[in-house]
Image: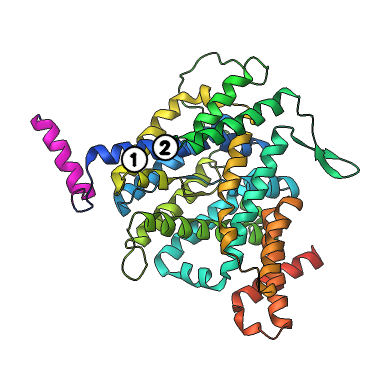
């Protein structure tokens, strides 16, 4: 090995403490590539979803990649963990379809809510307030939120492919399964399912790419003029915050929803993936959790400025951990690949909604697993959890699901003589939610 190679290895050893974490450069790089392969689909899906809020798709693509790079580099060098971050699934759907769709706000309003949420998250990372919020919200509702978001984004996927369509008599019904878009989506779900069964790394991303190719002869996928280009401009989406409505109740509800889901997603992912890698200490807590949460919070804040929805730690990081990733070098490798992907925007830009629909459906499935942790025998727990889950897809709103769950939880506990089980935070939020429905 050359002196230069020795120096590079020495730098990586000192920076990421590879020997201390019982890993090596080769293992970490392979783990980083694996993680990118499993979550690279976000470069296609996120611009697709946020374009429904009338955001510039090219600009969102660049913002998605840049926010992932910045947050992941902080995770790599500051926290030294193999976790990778990017704009989160579920919250991008809430951004586009609830805040901008159902509630009728501009995407600038939504970006402002994300920005404010990020600032609050940064402050929480320093003062330990996140524990207070986490402890205040009942565990069954935390699990129900994940399940409800899973159903909601799967529903959006089916709609995007025309498999589910609107209907005056029944509100929704099955669309024509012989339409090209529906055929592409159905084949994509089957192909992705087979790849997942065979444990192929990057199954979701590969499924999207194969579906895109299938869409070419069917006229669903446009043919690109070129495959490599400079990154699309951020000018149409970056620094477009609108502070004119920051003191409205709608802003409070939207901002809290972003914060609520972001905090629980992040902590759940960090603890869940870390436990698989034996990174938790003897008390079951994660060392260096503050810098890990700080990476998430800064990613969200910077992402909002650049023009994308909430950045969060990806559960797909577990795929890299499964490959042996144990340090920030895994995250650094993924960040470098996101940087290279910036120059492949034409490829990601031609991917049609029908090709990303299978990813939404499959990710929806992944988000269902917490349902096994919900206590269905205690009806003061089960009913609020169920309302949280069911209201998200049928009300077409993550926020409404959370509202129904929290208010019903507070009311049922109070009227069954178990009011002391409810945190004052939940009571205060429930009262605010009820007032919103009465007066707004």
Task: Look at the image and say whether residue 338 sits in the magenta stretch.
Answer: no
- Tell me the distance, in whole angstroms, between the alpha carbons under discs 1 and 2: 9 Å
Image quarter hosting the N terminus: top left
Name the residue at 32% across, 58% down: 279
Residue 8 occupies which quadrant of the picture?
Answer: top left
**What residue is shown with label 2?**
36
Name the residue furthest left: 3
Comparing 76 with 188, the one in front is 188
**What residue is shown with label 1?**
31
Name the residue at 79% across, 29% down: 176
Question: Callout 1: helix, strand or loop?
Answer: helix
Q: Residues within 10 Å of mark 1 (few under 14, many from 20)?
A: many
Examine the residues drawn in magenta and state their main secondary structure: helix
Mark earlier in primary sequence (1, 2): 1
Question: Callout 2: helix, strand or loop?
Answer: helix
**On the picture, is 318 further left or further right than 45?**
left
Q: Residues within 10 Å of mark 2 (few under 14, many from 20)?
A: many
Residue 121: x, y in percent?
48, 60
Residue 373: x, y in percent?
56, 63
Q: Is residue 235 visible?
A: no
Q: Which portion, as a residue range, is magenta?
A: 2-19
Name the residue at 32% across, 61% down: 288
Residue 152: x, y in percent?
67, 48
Task: Look at the image and say whether residue 10 sits in the magenta stretch.
Answer: yes
Name the residue at 29% across, 49% down: 327
- Up-down relation of residue 387 to residue 169 (above or below): below
For discs 1 and 2, the disc positioned in front in the rendered view: 1
State the mark number for residue 18. Answer: none
- Up-down relation of residue 246 to residue 199 (above or below): below
Q: Is residue 205 visible?
A: yes
Residue 222: x, y in percent?
62, 18
């Amino acid at each position: 090995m050359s002196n230069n190679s020795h120096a590079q290895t020495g730098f990586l050893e000192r920076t990421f403490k590879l020997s201390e974490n019982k890993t090596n450069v080769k293992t970490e790089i392979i783990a980083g590539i694996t993680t990118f392969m499993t979550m690279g689909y976000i470069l296609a899906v996120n611009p697709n979803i946020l374009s429904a809020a009338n955001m510039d798709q090219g600009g969102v693509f660049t913002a998605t990649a840049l926010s992932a790079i910045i947050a992941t580099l902080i995770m790599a060098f500051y926290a030294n963990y193999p976790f990778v971050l990017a704009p989160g699934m579920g919250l991008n759907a809430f951004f586009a379809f609830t805040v901008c769709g159902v509630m009728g706000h501009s995407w600038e309003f939504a970006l402002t809510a994300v920005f404010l949420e990020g600032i609050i998250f940064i402050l929480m990372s320093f003062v330990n307030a996140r524990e207070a919020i986490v402890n205040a919200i009942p565990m069954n509702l935390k699990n129900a939120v994940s399940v409800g978001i899973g159903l909601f984004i799967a529903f959006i996927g089916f709609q995007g492919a025309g498999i589910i369509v609107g209907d005056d008599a029944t509100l929704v019904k099955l669309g024509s399964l012989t339409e090209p878009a529906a055929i592409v989506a159905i084949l994509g779900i089957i192909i992705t399912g087979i790849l997942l069964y065979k444990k192929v790394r990057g199954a979701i991303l590969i499924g999207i790419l194969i579906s895109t190719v299938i869409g070419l002869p069917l006229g669903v996928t446009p043919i690109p003029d070129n495959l490599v280009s400079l990154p699309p401009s951020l000018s149409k989406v970056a620094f477009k915050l609108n502070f004119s409505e920051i003191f409205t109740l709608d802003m409070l509800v939207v901002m809290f929803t972003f914060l609520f889901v972001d905090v629980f997603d992040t902590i759940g992912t960090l603890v869940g993936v870390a436990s698989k890698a034996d990174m938790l200490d003897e008390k079951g807590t994660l060392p260096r959790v503050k810098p890990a949460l700080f990476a998430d919070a800064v990613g969200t804040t910077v992402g909002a400025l650049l023009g994308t929805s909430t950045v969060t730690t990806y559960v797909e990081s577990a795929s890299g951990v499964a490959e042996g990733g144990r340090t920030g070098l895994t995250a650094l490798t993924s960040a470098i690949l996101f940087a290279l992907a910036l120059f492949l925007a034409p490829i990601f830009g031609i991917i049609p909604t029908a090709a990303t629909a299978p990813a939404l459906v499959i990710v929806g499935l992944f988000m269902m697993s917490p349902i096994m942790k919900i206590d269905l025998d205690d009806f003061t727990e089960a009913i609020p959890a169920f309302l949280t889950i069911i209201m998200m897809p049928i009300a077409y709103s993550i926020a409404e699901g959370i509202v129904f769950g929290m208010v019903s939880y507070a009311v049922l506990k109070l009227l069954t003589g178990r009011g002391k089980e409810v945190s004052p935070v939940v009571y205060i939020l429930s009262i605010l939610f009820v007032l919103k429905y009465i007066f707004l």
